[in-house]
Amino acid sequence: MTERVRVGIAGLGSYVPERILTNEHFAQVLDTSHEWIVQRTGICERRFAAPDQATSDLALLACERALESAGRKPEDVDLIVTGTLTPDYLLPGASVLVQDRLGACNAGTFDVNTACTGFLTALHTAEAFVAAGRAKCVLAIGAETLSRFLNMEDRASAILFGDGAGAAVVTPWEECRQGEVLRTTLGADGSLYNIIHMEGGGSRMPPSEKSVADRQHFISLRGREVYRFAVNKMADLIAEMAEGYGEEDIGIVIPHQVNARIIESALDRIGWPREKVMINIDRYANTSAATVPIAWDQAIREGRMVKDKLVILVAFGAGVTWGASLLRW
C-alpha cells in the first residue's frame, strides 16, 4: 500500500473586482438603509464584477497571485479544481477556461458545485490527490460572480452577496513546509436543498419566457431556516476541527463569511474568542465559494497566520453542504 503523502499549502492568492457597491446604493432602490443592513448582516459594502468580467476572469487573477506566492509556474500545475456555482457557461466548466488562459498546459481540470462550500470541497479534493500521489501541484479555487444571479428587487437576497475569487496552491508538505493539512470533513443534507435555491436554468426548468418573467433564475433563500442551520453547523464544525487541542493551540479560525451575526452567534455557542476569528464580510459581503480563500489570503497579508499554530477553515452552503479543514501553519 502506498504511504500517504503529507500535504501542505505552498501559496495563496485572491482577487476582488474594483467596482464597490455600498449599502447606500441599495437604500436608494429598496426599502432599506445602511443601518438596517449593518445591524442584520454586518455588511457595509461589496464588490461587483465589471460587465466584461466573468467567473473565470476573477479566478485567473487569483491563480496568478497564488502561483507567484508559491514560487510556481503555470506549467508546474497538474490539476485545477474550481468550486463555483456561477461558471461562465453551463458547458464547459470554468476550470478549463482558467487552464487555457493561465497557460497550465499540463493540468487536468474539473469544477465542483457545493455552493458556499465550494472552495473547501476543491481543497479537500486537491489534498486527496496529492496525498495519494496522483498529483504534485494542484490549484484549488473558489470563485463567483453572484451579482449576475441576484434579484435586485428582493431585499432579502440582493444585499447579501458580492463577487470575488481566491486560490490555494496545494503541494506535498515537504516541498513547502507550511500549511500542513491535518484533518478534513465534508457533509451534506439534501433534504434541505430548497432553503437556498435557484429554480431556473437547469434540466428541471430550462430557460423560457415564463421562467425569466417569474424571476426563477435568481438566488432565493429562506432566511430564518438558513440562520438556524448555519449557527449550529458552524459551531459544530469548529468544535469538531478543534477536538483534542486547547484554545492556545489555535492560531486563527477562518469561517465562510455568510453573515456577521451568524458567525457571532456560532462563536457564542461554543465560547470562542472573536479575536481569533477572521471576519471581512463588512468589506466584501458573501462571495460564496470565494469567501474562505479571500479571507485566508487577507489574514496572511495582515500577518495573522502564526507559525506552527493551527488554522481552522469552515463553510456551509446550498444543498445543504458543509466542510471544514484543520491545518498547521
Image (spheres, grey):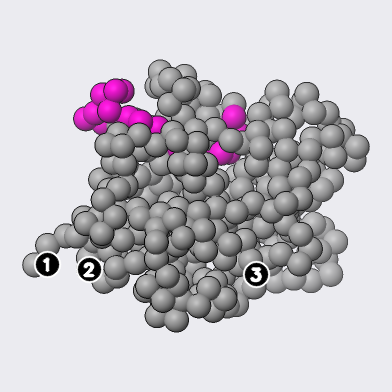
Q: Secondary structure at mark 1?
A: loop
Residue 250 among magenta residues: yes
Looking at this view, is 83 or 56 the one in front? 56
Q: Is residue 128 visible?
A: no
- Judge whether 317 appears above or below 81 on screen: above
| Three-letter code, disc 1 | Thr
- Residue at the spot x=50%, y=78% of the render? 103
Q: Is residue 279 left or right of residue 138?
A: right
Residue in view at x 26 percent, y 24 percent = 246
Q: Give the residue at mark 2.
A: 133
Q: Circle 2 sits in a helix, a strand or a loop, which is it?
A: loop
Give x and y (percent) for residue 127: 31, 58
Q: Tell me which numbered mark, 1 or 2, is placed earlier along the sequence.
A: 1
Residue highlighted by disc 1: 2
**Circles 1, 2 touching at the beta carbon (< 8 Å):** yes
In this view, the residue in front, 22 or 18, is: 18
Residue 52: assigned label: none
Q: Which image quadrant is residue 253 in?
A: top left
Identified at 85% across, 61% down, the residue is 213
The amino acid beneath tag 3 is: Asp
Residue occupied by mark 3: 88
- Three-letter residue code for mark 2: Gly
Marked residue nearer the N-terminal end (2 or 3) = 3
Residue 189 is situated, as x and y percent measured from the top left of the image, at 45, 48
